Image: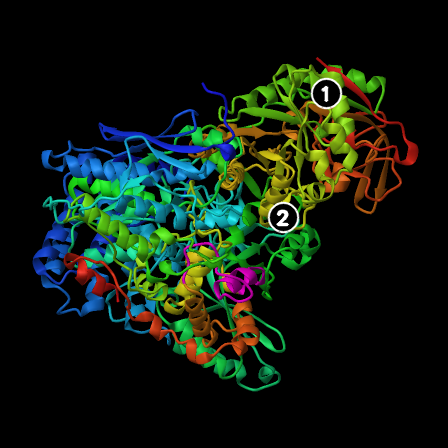
Amino acid sequence: MTNPIQPRLTQVFRFVRCSYADGVAELVYQFDQGEELIERVRFPAAPAIGAGHKQAFEAALKMLHLIAGVSYYKAGVPPKIEVADGPLDDTTASLLDALYLHGLAEFAYRNGLDLRGRINFPCIVSTHAKTAPALHLPKRTLVPIGGGKDSLVAVEAIKQIGGQATAVWVGNSPLIASCAERTGLPTLNIQRELAPGLFELNRLGAWNGHIPVTAVNSAILAVAAILYGYDSIAFANERSASAATLEYEGQQVNHQWSKGYAFEQMFSDWLHTHVAADLDYCSLLRPYSELAITRAFAKLTPYFDVFSSCNRNFKILGPKPADRWCGQCPKCHFVFLALAPFLPKPRLLAIFGRNLLDDESQAAGFDALLEYHDHKPFECVGEGAEARAAMYALSQRPEWQEDALVARFRSEILPQLDVAELALEPWLTPAGDHRVPDRLQAALVAIG
Amino acid sequence: MKFGGTSVATLPRWQNIRELVASRRAEGARVVVVVSALTGITDALKHLCTQDDKGKRIEAAKAIAQRHYDLLDHMQLAVPDTLASRLSELAKLAEEGPASLGELAWSAQVQAQGELMSSSLGAAFLTHSGLATQWVDARDCLAAIALPNQNERTKLLSAMVEAKPDPSLNARLARLGDVFITQGFIARESKGRTVLLGRGGSDTSASYFGALLKAQRVEIWTDVAGMFTANPRQVPGARLLQKLDYEEAQEIASTGAKVLHPRCLSPLREPRVPMLIKDTNRPELEGTVIGPEVREHAPSVKAISARKGLTLVSMESVGMWQQVGFLADVFTHFKQHGLSVDLISSAETNVTVSLDPTENLLDSDAVAALASDLAKSCRVKVIAPCAAITLVGRGMRSMLHTLSSVLAEFGQLRVHLISQSSNNLNLTFVVDESVVDELVPRLHEMLITAGALRTDDSALFGSSWQSLYGSGETVVAADAWWRTACRDELLALGVQATPRYVYHLPTVRRQARELKSLGSVDRLHYAVKANTHPAILRALAEEGFGFECVSPGELKAVMAAVPESAPLLFTPNFAPREDYAWAFTTRATVSLDSLYPLEHWGDVFRGREIVLRIDLGRGLGHHEKVRTGGSGSKFGLPVEQIDAFLRLADTYNVTVRGLHAHLGSGILDAKHWGEVYGQLASLAERIGSVDFLDIGGGLGVPSHPGEARLDIAALDEVLRKVKSAYPHYKLWMEPGRYLVADAGVLITRVTQQKGKGSWRYLGVDTGMNSLIRPALYDAWHEIVNLTRLDEPATALYQVVGPICESGDVIGSDRRLPEAKEGDVMLIAQAGAYGKVMSSPYNLRDEAEEIILE
């Protein structure tokens, strides 16, 4: 045992090594000369790696090592980053630089840190562009399930076009497991065990905060796609994920940066050039707004009693709505508001077990969603204008307009808004770029 | 005697029926047995009716026949002719389809076969086993009547029978024999077609027969012993109701109880035929008798029920005031949108109604459309999801004074509607659905404590559901130490001098060891405020307990009594600055529960490790004053201030090592600690430095006889489950009362007696000066006359102390033996919050404390 270190005073963060055997990937990190931090990712019932896939697997595994390091790096945010087996090529390094800078922007903002200029992955500029061969991966899709509405909309769209897919999730959330089961798809549950040393570092006063977890999961799924044989990974990140939460000292801070289109493009390009030319990474919901997605979800009645978008980590589930929806967090507020225009009121209230819009103590939470008096919350929620459109729609409905917060919106907030900008319909049409591969285009259409 | 589908589906069940019928015969009664179809057969017949394909119908009929053949096989009986003809009729109906009879009549005819077959089979079995049984076609006895509001469907599939006593039927049956078997669920209408009686039809048939024959009684044999004071799934401690009148039973059935269909009682009311509900598997249990109203009991609430999923529509308008036809217009809209109105309450300018949860309500735009229509004439508000909580009991208004604590409980909630009908049978509150699961068990408990639900009346109330049907071992309190082993010693102590507190250390140790069996708990602290006697502190230190103290005084007392190795916790509330400063000079772990100390006295805490006590935003417990969570409570840091606290902690380099929450006292439901634990753990994940979670204490100690104890094994399982989700946090608990309450008694002697009207007061030589819990918390302590422990309890006393306060009542309405001056009285469960809360008020002598090793 080495002496305990002071995480915030460390000088170097080192990517020591990564390895894979018998379904378990070991990712090893280190601060200064401290104890090695070993994370394990467990792939259940893993087949042997196909002979022609070794190189692709190694590349994906190495990327996982580099991306998952963000959970550890942030404990100390030391000035120097070292990669034990030598510098990276410049595309890889610039992806990681961007991910660590933008993915940790909220963390930095909350802790009063400035990471600009601090994150430099070692690299050598290569003269020729890297390419990866096509591996003729089986035509089936990994669909990550999060327990919330978005991934369920994606799943149902793929089911509707008769696409082959597996519901996959990382970690042991009982909520996600029950949602995954309800999809009726084959399931794959990958386990991620954080290095126990990280808890120790936390006790010793490590920096703490939000990390770009979607990037980590994406890297895990890239490894899984090569290992089990899938030609596509279809996330369910929607359009507003690309919008910044706030701007702070000239830097855009986006809570869900790794769910945004910028990361999607970088990572998908990187997979095409470094892992397999025929491994597609996309988001099936990219052209859609939150409201378009909630409208689609409102038709998926069988999921109403299992799903939850609440961000409180329910590790123990009960049968009551309050066991899935805390009713206090921005996610609960937003999903409630965004579903309301599309569901009969008694049905919506039965999902949540209470009426959040008739509870005056929730005013501040809904104000933040509407970007009234406050910035958008640090959560994966829709844009302020979207929330305003949903609220406006409710304010015009007799069954809603007497509820405390809807009445307050009518009397206090609505007079300050331009009604012309509050229509619901524009939000329901798809717009903008996406990277959905040809094979899944029909599913994209099925959602709208 | 009526037997349902599961009761007629197997050979052992039929043997059971045979014995029950034989026993009634032995009593000299003639018996009519009413049976349902074999379990699953009615559904199979219904399914057959939905098949358009003839082949599939024939196949389904064959499968149904096979079920009956299998059972006959078990009975080792040949197929009786009567059943054979039924089966061929079914085969014919299946082959023909609905064409000739018409869809509804055909469907009724098909579904009726289930009961016709089971009764034929039953007649054969009973006769074969030596009990000559006549098969009677129910359709020859029950004539359906036509009602003006019926359509063809209700006429055929949910018919009504007018059942007036018919002596000619009695005479006809008497000529045939003594035991009869007939069918539930079916009747015949004026055109001679077979009709069905709809849901709950078999029970209703039994009632019709009971009324027609003016029977001695109707017995409904089912899978539970009767009606209970609450839904046992919500309230395991719900008591069996042994006696109800028709109206009460009907009210309970229509507000939630599933055991009886509400409509099966009305036929019995006029001929005054009683109904008895019995458990087929446990015929020895008393069951519920439902009969004409009886006046020999004190008024009591009989049951509490909850119906969930209600939607309220509140309509507000001055337009309705003294306006002809306003309500008629309003209700037209409800009808138009297919919404059924249940409860109604009105004020001069507001009408609020409740809607039952129908598919129409949940999945169509009915509510939106209704609201748009209503909005034209009034302001509409749609309130959901709601639940109706109903108290049922005859003479509800005369009991209002006993309901004050219950009403106070509602006072803390959003009550959307209160309704009480003129029949004075119920009192209904509509509240937010989210509170119901916790509220109902608590109200049930409160009703008992308040003497509104008189469970002490053993003529009305039977055993609890838990003790009758509870899974696993029922946890019954062992015989108290003072009643058995130490009785003589206590009596001698009492004769010597009173008042005295006596503590039994073996009981303290037993309780301590029981808690140590909680494998997932890493450390237990005794909350010393319950009892600071040094012998108790030492005994618990020997058991390895740490100690939780709330003041420097308690810390000093503990440090003087226990070895240096025992861990200490200092958990004060609104303590002055110097308390914290002093506590840091000891080995105690200090906890904070507000921002103020760090904001104003940050230097006291600089560089220290502390525990943060959090208010999770709701309180639980047996009394308002012992609830320690929720905004109305002064304890704990509200969750929304945690971030601010952590920023302050960072400023002073203070490390939050533990999180603590405590919901209140007297909690008997294991899952609450699981919830607190889970919530603390999810908060802890946001704070890196946390090492342990302290889920407090509050482990309930039941006081009323028959109340179930806290199930420690269940608690252990709940905690284990949470721990496996959050293995990186150590788990602490801090029980107090649980360890010491049962270990202590207060002994006192009778001084004088007084009669005032019908009230009898029994005076003892100490009161609220020694034991303030009854006055402060309405706490119920068992009181016995130790001198006359074995004498019959014939007197009803108000047991009072000598303090000049009208609240100095230790126990009201206690059944005790006739007492004499000088008798030694014992007040049980006085080991916790007894001596420590005593006062010198009135300058009466304080109670001495005695330890039994």
Say if residue B520 shows up in the picture: yes
**Residue type at mark 2?**
Gly
Quadrant in which residue A124 is drawn: top left
Residue B638 at x, y percent in the picture: 62, 47
The stretch drawn in magenta includes residue A359? yes
Say if residue B197 shows up in the picture: no
In the image as oriented, which residue stretches furthest toward the right? Answer: B843
Residue B21 at x, y percent in the picture: 35, 40
Find numbered disc 2 in the image and state the secondary structure of the residue it sits on: loop
Residue B779 drawn above or below residue A244: above
Q: What stretch is highlighted in magenta?
A: A358-382
Residue A161 drawn above or below residue B279: below
Please report, as a chain letter, where disc 2 is located: B
**Residue type at mark 1?**
Tyr
Same chain for labels 1 and 2? Say yes or no: yes
In the depicted view, which residue is nearer to us: A315 or A56? A56
The stretch drawn in magenta includes residue A152? no
Q: Mark 1 points at which residue?
A: B503
Q: Mark 2 points at which residue?
A: B630
Please report, as a chain letter, where disc 1 is located: B
In the depicted view, which residue is nearer to us: A65 or A49? A65
- Residue shown at 16%/59% (left/top)? A161
Which quarter of the rendering shows the C terminus of chain A? Answer: bottom left
